[in-house]
Image (cartoon, grey):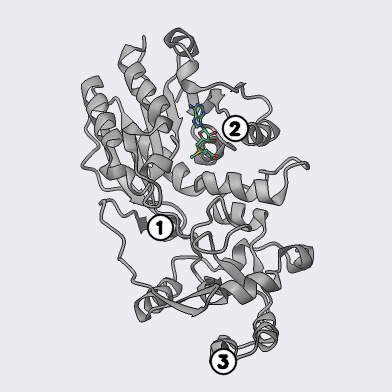
Amino acid sequence: METLRVVELYSGIGGMHSALKESGIPAQVVAAIDINTTANQIYKHNFPDTPLWNKTIEGISLDDFNKLSFDMILMSPPCQPFTRIGLQGDIRDSRTKSFLYILDLLPRLCKLPRFILLENVKGFESSSARELLVKTLKECGYTFKEVMVSPTSVGIPNSRLRYFMIAKISPEDFSSQKVRLADSQPKLTFRANISPEPTVTISFIKKHDHFLYKLETGTELQRKMKQNSVQSVRMVQDFLEPQMEVNLEHYLLPPKTLLRYALILDIVQPTCRRSTCFTKGYGRYVEGTGSVLQCCMETEMQSVFAGLDQCSEEEKLQRLSTLKLRYFTPREVANLMGFPQSFSFPEQITSKQQYKVLGNSLNVVVVSRLLQLLVS
Ligand SMILES: C[S@@+](CC[C@H](N)C(=O)[O-])C[C@H]1O[C@@H](n2cnc3c(N)ncnc32)[C@H](O)[C@@H]1O
């Protein structure tokens, strides 16, 4: 197969580029485009030979795109217009402008790229932006497939359910083909339908004026236990740094966080086969930003949490501290997101920045499998 010329739009830290390398497809990224200076420093550090354009996509002319004469587009447009938590501004949100520009540009290119892969959050599948994407692809003669995939589908103990569109110009219609992975791992099937995740109802209990505690429901607990029993998913411990190398002082949860958020933390042990999605606020905010790791396994969770609300602050802290709860390090988050060991951060990038850019990125293994499927 000839070397594909690839354009990586919204390149961030290069999750797509890493996935392309991982896929083994002969390819060269001829331009990576992003406006985030921190992400761009990290991209440059990891892919020094790739032309990186620090420009807005909508500021690049049709002519400049034509000059790249590319065969593939990889892109993760900004997801805020489509997230459940956001305002769901969709195509009315100014952050969708660059994506609409790409859709407008695509039919006018001298040469249509043979392959397109797009990643976005859950919520995109029901957006007007997706409708416009489908319309444009159909008009240009692409055949395409849409899937919702989480890394657990490829054996990684991390939830990150994302929407993917893979499209190609091809005489055969691959839209009805089953999305199936075949490799050395047990055969795993993607969730090829776009169905909603089970809804979990969580109860809020206001204990003190300024403390908001959230309790886990039976449904939630059952879901976690079920996730932990899926043998095709590896254990969290396979993705951890050697414990001696982790500066505990830096990553242990501070007393204030323990006292305030103990009951809403998603705690995982090294032998778990699950962890929640790491978002850009990980390490700064606690609620819904990603799991924390229990380092001391001698302590029973039950003995810490039973009757905790009856304890004095001092006693609470004393009990909670025995679990030795810590944040996953950025390297461990990168591992759970499938980044190769060769991927690294420049020295000047702080942990906070590392969590932030990783939270915006994607699962490399998932994308590399989808690329293989797309190009095969
Ligand atoms: C969801 S992130 C993509 C992350 C990337 N796939 C990665 O692996 O890190 C979206 C990226 O789009 C960039 N971006 C947003 N609007 C842009 C625009 N108009 N032109 C160029 N880049 C833009 C942001 O700076 C951000 O890095």
295 with respect to 302 (left or right): right
In front: 99, or 239? 99
Label 3 SS: helix
Amino acid at the residue labelled 1: Ser
Amino acid at the residue labelled 3: Gln
Label 1 SS: helix
Residue 259 % position (x, y): 63, 76
* Residue projecting furthest to the front: 209
Label 2 SS: loop
Residue 164 % position (x, y): 36, 42
* 349, above or below 335, in the image: above
For label 2, count other residues whose C-alpha is less than 10 Å away and answer few (under 14), some (14-19) or many (20+). Answer: some
* 245, above or below 173, in the image: below
Which residue is label 1 attached to? Answer: 153
Q: Earlier in the sequence, mark 3 or mark 2?
A: 2
Q: Residue at x 32, y 32 (%)?
A: 91
40 with respect to 193 (left or right): right
In front: 188, or 56? 56
The answer to whether residue 270 is seen in the rendering is: no
Q: Residue at x 34, y 77 (%)?
A: 219
For label 1, count other residues whose C-alpha is less than 10 Å away and answer few (under 14), some (14-19) or many (20+). Answer: many
Q: Report if the beta carbon of the residue with label 2 is closer than 8 angstroms to ligand 1.
A: yes
* 319, above or below 197, in the image: below
Amino acid at the residue labelled 2: Asn
Tell me the tag on residue 310.
3
Q: Residue at x 23, y 38 (%)?
A: 175
Query: Which part of the image, by quadrant, shows the C terminus?
Result: top left
* 57, above or below 302, in the image: above
Residue 55 % position (x, y): 56, 21
Which residue is label 2 attached to? Answer: 36
Cα–Cα gap, marks 3 and 2:
47 Å
Cα–Cα gap, marks 1 and 3:
41 Å
